[in-house]
Amino acid sequence: MNWFQRPGQPPKENVSADPRLHRGDTDAIATAVAQFLMKTGLFDRDAYVARYPDVAKSGLDPLHHYMRYGIQAGHNCTSLGTIARLWREVLLEKPAIDPAPVLDNPARFRAAVYVSSLGNFFMTEIADVIVCGLREAGVDARRLSEKDAPLPGTTHHIVVAPHEFFVLGDGRKWATDEFVSRAVLFSTEQIQTQWFARSLVFLLRAKAVADMNQQTAAILRKGGVKAIAVQPGYASTFAPFAVPATLPHSRALESLSPEVRSFDVTQTAFAARPIDLLFLGSTSPKREKHLAAFAPKLAKLNSFIYATRMSRPLTGEASPTASPEVTAALLQRSKILLNIHRDEYTYFEWWRVMQAFWNRTLVVTEPCFPHPVYKPGIHYLEEAPRHMPHLVEWLVRTPEGQAKAEDIRARAHADFTTLSTARSAALELLRAGGTA
C-alpha cells in the first residue's frame, strides 16, 4: 500500500537522501510501520476513530490517517484493552531460551554510545552506565552526542533513546539508512506513548533493538523486530552513585532541613535515614490523584515529593533535580522510594527501581508486571494505591516494619549488584551488534 504518494507525485527513489526520512513519511518506511502495527495488532481502529473525530471526516482509512497525520501529531493509536491483550499473549508465551554465546576477548571491540545532548537527563545517565559496563568488560567505549563525529574504527554503534537522538537538533543528520541499519537502538519508551510510535521508524530499520522492558521486547519480536531485553545495572565505576553524594543548594530543595543536608549517608540503618518517603517523577492525572489522596497521611511523615510538569525534555537547566548526583543524594537520605505508574499500564519501571536498589532504598510500588529476577515481597513491596500510606507508615514507624524494610532492601541491593550488572548488559549489547 502506498501511504503518502499523492496523485502526480513521482515515486521516491533515493530513500536515504530523503530529508523527511526521520519523520517516517516515505512510502517504504510508512509501509513498514503500518505492517508492524497490523502484525502485532497494536493499532486499535475503533479507539482511534472514537478518540479523534477528524478521522471520520477525512474519509481516510483510520490506519492510513494515522500514518499520514496521527503519528506526527502525537495521536494515541492503541487502547488499554489492546495492550492488555498483547500483554496476555506475551506473558503466556514461554519461548526457548538459548544460552548466550561466549564472547571472546571483548577488548577487540570499540563502541560508541550515542545520546542526544538535548534530551532528558536520565537518557545520558543510561548511556553513561552502559559506557561503564562496556569499559568494565574491557571495551574501548565513548559517549557521543549528535554533535560529534563518528570515531574511526568503531565496531558497535549503540543509540540510547532513538526517539530523542534522531529527532532533536542535529540528530536528524544521523537518521539515514546507512547509519541506522548498522546500529543497536536502545529503546526506553513505554509502548503506549507517542514517543514509542515515533521511534518505530528507526526501530524497524536497526541492526538490532534492545528494550528496557521484557514485555515490550516480546511485542517487538512479535512484529518481526530483532529485539532483546537489556536492563543496564550496577557498575562500581559509575561515579554519581559510587560515593556519598551531597545536596546542592537550590530553591527546589529549600524545604529540606539541616538534618537532611548534614546526614552522614555512610550510616547503614534504615531507621536512621531522615527522609521517610521520596517521590520523583513527572506529573500525570493518575499520579496527581493518588498523591493528593495520600496527603493527610504523608503530612505526618518527613516526605519529599518532587513532581515535574514536563512540556519539554528534562534537563539540568530546566530542573535542579535533573542530575544523577541529586538523585543519589536524595535516595541515600530516604527510607522509601514511592513508585506510582504514570497511567494504567503496569510496567516494571526498571530505571527508577534500579536507582533505589543501587542506593539501598526500599521500593514501595503499585503492582507491576512480573520480572524474571526481582520479586514482590523479596526485593520490593507491592501494594494497591489506597493502602500505600498505611504500609509506608507501618514500615517507617514500627519495629516490625523497620525490620521487614531492612531485610528487603538488603536482599535487593545484594542481588542487584551481583545479578544485574552493567557489564553483563554491555555484553548483551555487543552480541546484538555482532561479534565477528
Image (cartoon, grey):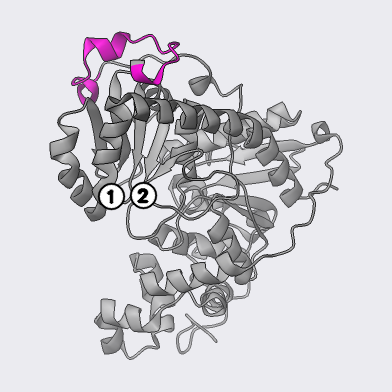
Q: Which residue is mark 2?
A: 366
279 on left or right of 257: right
Quadrant occupied by the N terminus: bottom right
- Position of residue 349 measured from the top left corner of the image (x, y, whole percent): 45, 47
Alpha carbons under labels 1 and 2: distance apart: 6 Å
Region of the chain picked out in magenta, as a range: 250-271
Q: Amino acid at mark 2?
A: Glu
Please tell me the numbered disc located at residue 420: none
Residues under numbered marks 1 and 2 in contact, where contact means CB atoms less than 8 Å apart = yes
Q: Label 1 neighbourhood size at 10 Å, few (<14), some (14-19), many (20+)?
A: some
Q: Amino acid at mark 1?
A: Pro
Q: Is residue 352 above or below residue 433?
A: above
Please tell me the numbered disc located at residue 385: 1
Residue 255 included in the magenta stretch of the image: yes
Q: Is residue 177 above or below residue 390?
A: below
Element class at badge 1: helix
Which of the 4 quarters of the picture holds residue 205?
bottom right
Q: Label 2 neighbourhood size at 10 Å, few (<14), some (14-19), many (20+)?
A: many
**As drawn, which residue projects farthest toward the left?**
296
